[in-house]
Structure formats: structure tokens, C-alpha cells
Amino acid sequence: MTEYAPQIRRLLALILAGFGLLFLVLTYWQVLMAPRLAADPNNQRQRLRLQRIKPGRAYTVDNQLVLDRQRGEKGWTAVYPQGRDFCHLTGYNAQSGLQKGLSDALFGQGVYANPWRDLLRGQPQGNDIVLTINAAAQKVATEELEGKRGAVVALDPTTGAVLALVSAPAYDPALVTSTTDEYELFRLDPQSPELNRALQGLYAPGSVFKVFTAAVALDLGLVNPRTEFTCRGRERVNNATVVCRRPAGHGTLDLNEAFYDSCNVVFAKLAAQIGIENFISYGKRFHLLDQADLALPSAAGRMYDFRGFKGKVALAEAGFGQGATMLSPLQVARLTAAIANRGQVLQPYLVEAVKSPEGVVVARGQAKALGQAVSPATAATLAGMMEQVVERGTGRGMGMSWTKVAAKTGSAEVRGKEPHAWFTCFAPADAPRYVVTVIVEHAGSGSEMALPIARRVLATLLEQSR
Amino acid sequence: MLTSTLVATLGMVLVCLAQDQSLLRALRVTTVGAGFVITSLILRPDGRGRDTHLLPYASLLCGLGVVLLWRIAPALASKQVVWMVLGLAALLATYWLVDDVAGLARWKYTAGALAVALLGVTMVLGIEVNGARLWLGIRDFFVFQPGEVAKVLMCLFLAGYVADKGPIIRAQVSFRPGVVLPGLKYVGPLILMVMFCLAIFVMQRDLGAAALFFGLFVAVTYLATGRKVYALLSVILFLAGMVAATRFFPHVSVRVGAWLNPWADAQGGGYQILQSLYSLAAGGVSGVGMGQGFPELLPAAGTDMIFSVAAEELGLAGTFALLLLYVLVTARSYSIAWRARHPYGALLAACLATVFGLQTLVIVGGCLRLVPLTGITLPFVSYGGTSVVVNFIALGLLLAVSRDCLPPSPDA
Amino acid sequence: MDMPLGLILLIGKFAFLAALYAFLTWAFRGLFRQMGLEASAGVAPVPPQPAPRPVPAPVAHPVASAGAPPATARSGAADGSPLVSAISHEHARPRLVVQEPGQSRLLAGQVIELTAALTIGRADDNGLVIDDRFCSSHHALIFTHGGERILRDRDSTNGTYHNGRRITGDVVLRDGDRINIGTVALDYRAPGIE
């Protein structure tokens, strides 16, 4: 030992104190601050960690591969075997479409997390998803909407399963993500292909909304199909000027005729009779003001809830689906499905099953009743009236030799432009299994422009089940 | 020794498994382990009271370093293995050549002049990388870091100087017992050394080396005089100089700003330190596992930020272990200094231990945002040829000093 | 490859950490053994100086080993400025007495009072200038440490002799010790300090 020993010992103590401080700070960052840092928006780890997980695949109910994956340089990337046909379902990256909406299932996160299974598997792997979509119907609908703007929704009214969900214009997910230029073109396209019109598009429903007005009036016992009305072609109802599609007017007609021949004057009067309170409360019972809750972004429907003078005008216009009432195609399809399902409203769903990579079903889609909107009797009466639309009304072109179809056409007026062509229907009318709703933007009358599309989609669905 | 080799090999096996690579590559780390085993076998018959623990500690640190480097960039790890083998050769050479440690004292002025010359040349002719001028040589062909070499040379000089002049300095200092503030004659050298450190800091843009040299000077001042006043005084001077530098030199203020609030410029100046913090957080208590972190997000993962890489993959448990290893090396080195029989040996060991401990504190503190992040290496673990070889030479010197120590135990 | 890789990696991770800590346990046990003995080294009598070593290298003699009382090492550790206490004994200031001036200009019987650190050599900046041919410019040093006067050779060419033996490290001076530098002989006198 030298004369420096005491100083040496104190230096060591000082350095050790420094290490002690490091231990404390290390604990602070690695334990106390860890959750906050992990959630920091600048932290890319969560996103990169998902890229390391082998994501699940998505299939349609008839076993068509919709979303695949491949190993890229920086982890797994998505592949789109169906291209444009399923673009609004698959999305074009992890932040869009079902890749975002179902990411927990696809990447085995959240409620689908299974650390033990991952450990045994050797590599974290997500779950496969079976969609309720009928691939054939989806493809036919996409094909029919090619070159147009619009949407097609097909539902199973007995369960709420979504059988087709198409929005046009479509895009090619692989192409738009290929280069930045393509991506910019896609994002800035004035036709907004990224928008999923079936869920996010809000349109005036036009005459297809008469299904709702009629259902409410029947359910309240205000009218029956034989109740007579007069139509003079152009009338003022609730201070709103209502113009009928027949300029000369229908004269005296009953509700049934008013429905199948789509008389605006009668339905304006009906709405006035129903009153704003009932109108809104039935809107809620049909869940028209909800979002779709399909793991995809969707818009809630809008109804004019305005008391006073303006509200009365809006109510009369709402009776035949104009004015401030705005619905998405899916909500119109739900309305139709509720009538087809004896007045019961069901929660629509897109996922038939979630399967582990080993093929074990982890979760299954189920019909979920949201409540009775109208009585079964009302629904049956209305279904009969909708059959009349096909038999002798505006939907005559829908007639099929081997099954009965119930339908309603619509031409929603848009100021200064061609009206949106609407068509909604279900079949078979006596034991409904399919609901098809079509809208084509600024195309003209529903019976001319939307009906043929619905006809092909419905035929495709019916053929498959025969 | 064999234990540490096994530990490192296990780590390597884990990396290879996690990254889908052939297990045979794990043997690479065994090369380093074998090098250490051979070295200790060569040293064994020495018979003098050499320290037997430092070499295993270093071998484990080196093993961990190679594993982490392999995980970051396999090419770096392969080069590092070569450097480590060269380093071991340098260690043996140092140990044998320095048969009489006290004899090294004769070279003190040569060492000191060389250290200052190396630093001076680097300041003028150095190659600038990432805004810091720390390298000498031809870019992309052969570069070395004179700062690392200067570190050990400075230790040799300071130890020699104090061993010779220490009693005189002490006598002068203690002649005026009641006076707390020493006269200008004694403050002069302090100011000079503070200026020297600030020059490194500003001209080389290397805060790490500046802090390291400064800490060494303060420690030596304290060793020589045994008075804390000088240490405190020089710390105050240095901090004042830093504040002034922050005010006057924009590149310094940018760095300090990134340290004080990295979130203000999360994609620019604050990027590196933020990524380090995210790594620490991702590691949690037990880590994400070898080979399963994201070192690719960390700039300079293999050199400055290797501690953060370890923190992510091994968690708090691993970083505690790593820091404890450094505590061991530092404490063991000081213990050699404490037990040394000759003043020169004691001072040399103390200087080397101080450099070693301080370097670890500064770089790890940087990764933890305790101090501004600097570009110095984590001894034995970080990638860097000069650093590795110099660390081994320092280790060789420590072992040489340990031969002339009081025996650790009467019956040993 | 159908093995549960994730599980292997998880077990491996903990095995790795366990191995690390096993190593640390071993290492710290070694360190504490060493430190524990160090702590007692100041109190217990220091082991006697090992017999002449097989290696002929100049080995420093530890200060504490030159027959000092057991408390020596501790008193140095007691406070930061060990020199003050020694100087306060004004009446007993130790000194050197020239016994043989040899070739130097010193006078026999000349008394040199010791300061806290007295440098001895041929150069003018020394506390004690010895203009002897065999004296190096900075030859030796006598300084205070823990209340003791210590003689140290400063790598002189011809060496410093203490009681007839050439010193290789530090030597604690006792009253009446003889120091030989070149042709000069000095006696160390420190009455009252023992």
C-alpha cells in the first residue's frame, strides 16, 4: 500500500456512486417509463413488430383467397390475389380496409393474442379469417359497376351476414402501392376511389325510403294498403311543394298503388301524418342512425331532427326520401333486410370465422338481433306491397320466372344533376334469403340503371343456392 | 474463464436461432473465448501474484460484444474478432515487456508529449466523421482513433509525474493549512488543463473525450494532493467553460438542445437519443430476447449505442448484469491500485481504473439521457479496432501492476 | 423444423441471464474476499516482507512493512491532509545532520531542518543541494506521510543508501538512521517523535 491508498479508495467510492446512479436511471427508463415510451408516437417499434408477425390470410365463405402475405425484405407484406374485386375490403396497406379493422385477428393481437401458442409455433403468427362474402356475387357486382360510380350491398336477412360489399370506382391495391406517383394519383383522384361508398357514402335515399315511411305508417295503424289518397300531381304538404312523378297526378289511389307506382304526394302526406317524433323514433328502431360496425369505417345515417317550421318541410320531404335524410347503401340494405326478416333488425357482420393457422376456429360470426323495428304483420304487409312493385310497378324488369322478388326502386334527386339510381330488393319474397341494394350515382332512374345490376347479383346468389 | 466463454456462446446460439442462421456460426464467438483461455494458460506459470479475475471479466465482456455485434452486423463481428485476437497479443506483449512497472516511469515525458502530439495532430489533420474529428488515417482504408491511444499515454504520463512530484506538490499545498483557496501558482495548471479539455471539446467536437480527459485530470489532482478543493474548483471551471461553449458555438448548442429536449426535434437532432430510450423501454425487465430487438433503428448501434441494443434484447436483468461486470472490472482495478507496493504502480492502476470507469459512466449515461450523448466506446464491447487493442494494452498494464501487489490473502 | 422455437428462445433467454448472474456471483465473491482482507490488512500486522525474491527486479518496499506499528496504514487513511499534524510539533522538528561532507561543499555537523517535502539533488531547485559528482540532479526526497518521514530515491544513477543498504522503494526514517548519497553521509535526527 502506498500513500495514495486513501484517495484511491475514495475515487472508487465516487465511481461506484456513479454506477449506482446509472442503475437508478436505468430502472426509471426500463420499468417506470417503459409503457409511456412504448406508446410514444415517434416510436416505430409497434408497427415494426407487427411486420415481423406472419399475418393470417383472408378467405371468402366460398373459399376464395382474398388477402395473402409474402415475406419481404422488411418483414411480411400483404398480397391481393383478387385485386380490384375486393379492394375496399382488403384495403391497400396495414392502415386501411380490413387489414386495419381486423388487425387484431390477423396479427394475433389483443383478444386474439396467444403467447403460449406463439412460443410453441416458433414464430408469431396471426389468424386466418373467413369472410361472409360470396365471391361470385362480389365479382359480378364489381363487374357491373365498372365504369360507374356507386355501390352494391348484399345481405343475408336471416343472419345479417354481408354477402357482397362493392364500391365503384375500384382500385388495384397492388398498383396504387407500387410507386409514390401511383399512390399520389390514387389519393388525389377526383372520383375518390379510396372511399368505400357502400359504407361511407351518404345519399338521399329517394323513393326506396318509402319502404320506411310505409312501414311506420302501417305499424302505427294509421293506414292499411287499401287506404285511399288523392294525388293532384303538385301539392303543398307541410309548406313543402311536392311534385309527383306523374305531372297530371294519380287522382284517387290507395296506398298499395301509391307504393308500387311511387307517388311522392301520398308519402309526403303520410309523413306529415306520422309526425316528427314517430318518424325519428322509428328511424332509431331501424338503426338507421347507427354506424355499420363492420370493422370498416362507415357513416351514420342522418335524419332531419329539427322542430318548427323548417322541420315540418323537411319531414314532408323525408316521407319520400328527399331533403335532409341521408343514408348509406348499407343502411338501405339493412332497412330492406328488416322487412324481409319479419320486422326484426339484425346486426350486419363480415367475419364468418377466425381460424388459427392450425385450422382451429377461434371465433365465429353470429346473427345478433338488435330489436323489433316493426311488427311481423307490418313487415308481411309491406313485403306484399314490395312484391307488387315487381309485379306491376316500377320494378317490373326484376321479374324472375322461378322466384318471387320484392323490391323498391328509387331516383334520388340531386340539384342540377342526374338523380342517383336506387334499387333495393329481397328474394325469395315468401322465404327471404338475399337482400340486394344498389346505387349508381347520377345515373338516372332506378328501374333503368340500378335494377339490372341488382338483378344480376341476385341471380348469381340464387343460382348458387339452387 | 470457461464459464464466460460458455455464457457468450449460449448468447450467440440464441442470436443464430432467432435469426434463422446456422448454428455453426456460434463457433465464431468461441474463437474469442479460446483466445482468452490460451492467453490465461500462457500467463499461468508466471508465479507472481497476478490478478486472476480481470481476464475472465474482460473475456465475458468481449464475448457479449461479439454476440451483440453479430446481431447488429455480422461483418463487424468478424472484424472485431480479429481485433480482439490482436488485442490479446498486445496484452501478452505488454505484460512481458513491462517486466518492471516502475521502470516505465522513466518514459513519462515521452508518453505525455506523444499524447498531446497525437491529439494535436488529430485536431488539425483529422478526418471528420459525423461532425466529430476523431480519426487519423486514410478514409475507408485505414483509420485509427488517436484519442484512444492518448488515453493510455496520458495515464502513463500522469502516473509518472505524480509518483515523482507528488510529495513535493503535497508539501507545497499543505504549507498553508487554513487557506481554502489556493494561490494563483497552483490554480494555473488547473486552468491550463481545463483549457486543454475544452479545446478537445470544441475543436474535435468530441464531448466524450473531453469529459474523459477532464475526469482523469481531476482524479489525478485529487490523488496527488488529497484535497477536494482542487477537484471542485476545476469541475466548476469546466462546467462554466461548457456553458460558454454552448453559448458561442452553434454545433455545441444543437447537441445540448437535443439532450435537454429530444422531443422538440424527434426526427433530427433528438432522433438518436429517442431511439435509445425506446430501446430501453422495449427491453423492459427481462428483454425481448437475443436477436429479437430492433437495433436497425439505432444510429451507430455497434459503437456508441451498443448498450441500448443490449438493453432491448436483455432487459433490465441484462443491463444490470452488464453494468455489474463493469463495476467488477473497475473495482478490481482500483483494488490493484490500492494494494500496489510502488507509488508509480498504484497511480498507474488508479488512472487506468478511473479512465475505464469514467468511460463506462459517460457512454452509458449518454444512452440513458443522464448526460449528453457522446461518441466514445463502451470498453471491450463496442466495435472499434483502436479501442479494443488499447483496452487490452491497458489490461496488460493492470495485470503487470498486479504482480507487485500485497497478496490478497495471507494464505494465498 | 417442427420444434417449438419460441419456447426454446424463451428458455434460452432466461438460461443466458441465469448464466450471466452465476458468473457475477462467482466474480463478486472473489472481489469481496479480496476487499474483506484489505479492510483487515490495516489492523492486522502486515505479513513480513517476503524473503528475497527469485526475480531480481527492483521491488518497492511497502511503507507499512518496515516494522511500523500496526496503526500506520490507518492513520494515513484518517484524513485528506496527513501532513499538517507532523508540522505542528514545532519543538520536535526533525532534521538531517551532515556527518561526512565528502566532495560536497556541505560542512560536517551542518543541520538541515526538514520541510514537509525536502528534495535532495545536485540541481539548484532542490531543497538540499549536494554538489557531488555522484549525486544526480534530482536524487532523492524526504517527505511526510501519516506522521512518518519517508525517504524515497528518485531514480538516481548511483542510488540512495539507508543504513548501508541501497533502497529500492520507500523507507521510513527512524531517529539515528544513516543516509548515504554519493560521497555524503547524513544522519536523521528526530528527537521526541517515536
Image (tube, rainbow, N blue to C red):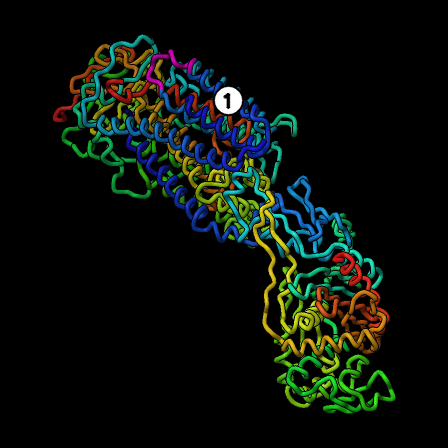
User: Taking B244 as reference, is C91 above or below it?
Assistant: above
Residue A436 falls in which quadrant of the image? bottom right
Chain ID of residue with mark 1: B
Q: Nearer the viewer, residue C77 or C127?
A: C77
Q: Nearer the viewer, residue A347 or A39?
A: A347
Under circle 1, the secondary element is helix
Residue B40 falls in which quadrant of the image? top left
User: Taking B32 as reference, is B376 above or below it?
Assistant: below
Q: Position of residue B160 (x, y in %)?
A: 39, 24
Which quadrant: the N terminus of chain C? top right
Q: Is residue B157 visible?
A: no
- Using residue C74 as the reference point, say whether residue B195 is left or right of it: right
Q: Nearer the viewer, residue A428 or B394?
A: A428
Determine which residue is flagged by label 1. Answer: B30
Structural crowding at the residue carrying mark 1, measured as other residues with C-alpha within 10 Å and reported as few (<14), some (14–19) or many (≥20): many
Q: Position of residue B106 (x, y in %)?
A: 41, 19
User: Taking A420 as reference, is B26 above or below it?
Assistant: above
Q: Position of residue C47 (x, y in %)?
A: 21, 18
- Using residue B394 as the reference point, say whether residue A212 is left or right of it: right
Q: Which residues are magenta?
A: B41-50
Q: Nearer the viewer, residue A64 or B225?
A: A64
> Does the magenta run of residues contain B43?
yes
- Using residue A257 as the reference point, say whether residue B168 is left or right of it: left
Identify which amino acid the numbered label 1 is placed on: Thr
Q: Position of residue C156 (x, y in %)?
A: 34, 15
